[in-house]
Amino acid sequence: MTPNDYLTLVQLKADMPDVAWGTTYDAALGVAITRVSRLIDSELGRAPGAFAVGSTNEIRYYTADSRGHGVLAFGSQNFGNQDLTIDEIAGLPTEVAVNETAANPSLSTSYTVYDPSWYWCVPENAALEGLPYTLLHIDILTSFKKFWYPFYRGIRVTGPFGFSTTAPDEIVQACEIQIVRWFKRAQQAYADVGAIAELGQLKYVNKLDRDVAEVLDLPKYQRVAL
């Protein structure tokens, strides 16, 4: 599947003040939109299109306690704990299913679908703060489930994996800034230094735009290591 770009050509043109774009550069701007979108993914260490995954659901498998969590020992048997770290997911999972018997995980009948009321998606206020969920917590107060079973690939999570379903405004703005900067640099044969004749100044342009770098450095967009 082709990853989504973070803005459209129409949106880019509409947001550029005092510029009559016409259609001459449509192809070049379209390529730049895709390249800058992927640059932002790379800069932030995320999968292509992670900031605009849409409503497409994906299935991923997890093994409880495989990401640094300890286990609770009862007698001679080990049980998984209440927390399961997952990849960033841009919305509530559409399904969480668990292999509770250690049967062949390739068989769909080996999984028990958990009711959403049996677990919490963490951070609890992620949707309000424009953040993805990164952890599932078994709610031992409202369900009869007490832990995540620690069988290999024993937890199947379905949902829109990524940072967000649509690109955050700051990411869109960062794309626009960098696209226009690249466009103007291309008009100067990709020189490392550009002149501002009206001001008699030289402008160095061989780095990521400062405003873009500041957006990408915001704590909310920093990738949390699993």
Image: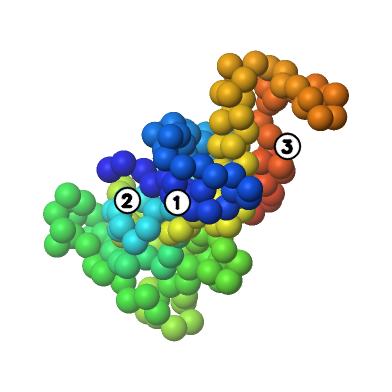
Closer to the camera: disc 2 or disc 1? Answer: 1
Secondary element type, mark 2 = strand
Q: Amino acid at mark 2?
A: Tyr
Q: CA distance from mark 1 to mark 3?
A: 25 Å
Front-most of residues 57 and 5: 5
**Percent x, y of residue 40:** 54, 39
The mark that comes first in sequence, 1 or 3, is 1
Q: Which residue is mark 2?
A: 61
Using residue 224 as the reference point, say whether residue 192 is left or right of it.
right
Residue 204 - label = none
The mark that comes first in sequence, 3 or 2, is 2
Secondary element type, mark 3 = helix
Point out the residue furthest to the right here: 200
- Does residue 82 show up? no
Q: Amino acid at mark 1?
A: Val
| Residue drawn where x is 65% and y is 16% of the image | 191
Q: Is residue 114 above or below residue 76?
A: below
Front-most of residues 72 and 39: 39
Secondary element type, mark 1 = helix
- Does residue 5 show up? yes
Q: Which class describes the residues within 10 Å of circle 1: few (<14), some (14-19), or many (20+)?
A: few
Closer to the camera: disc 3 or disc 2? Answer: 3
Q: Which residue is mark 1?
A: 10
Using residue 199 as the reference point, say whether residue 170 is left or right of it.
left
The mark that comes first in sequence, 2 or 1, is 1
Marks 3 & 2, CB-CB < 8 Å contact:
no
**Percent x, y of residue 81:** 47, 61
Q: Which residue is mark 3?
A: 210
Closer to the camera: disc 1 or disc 3? Answer: 1
Marks 2 & 1, CB-CB < 8 Å contact:
no
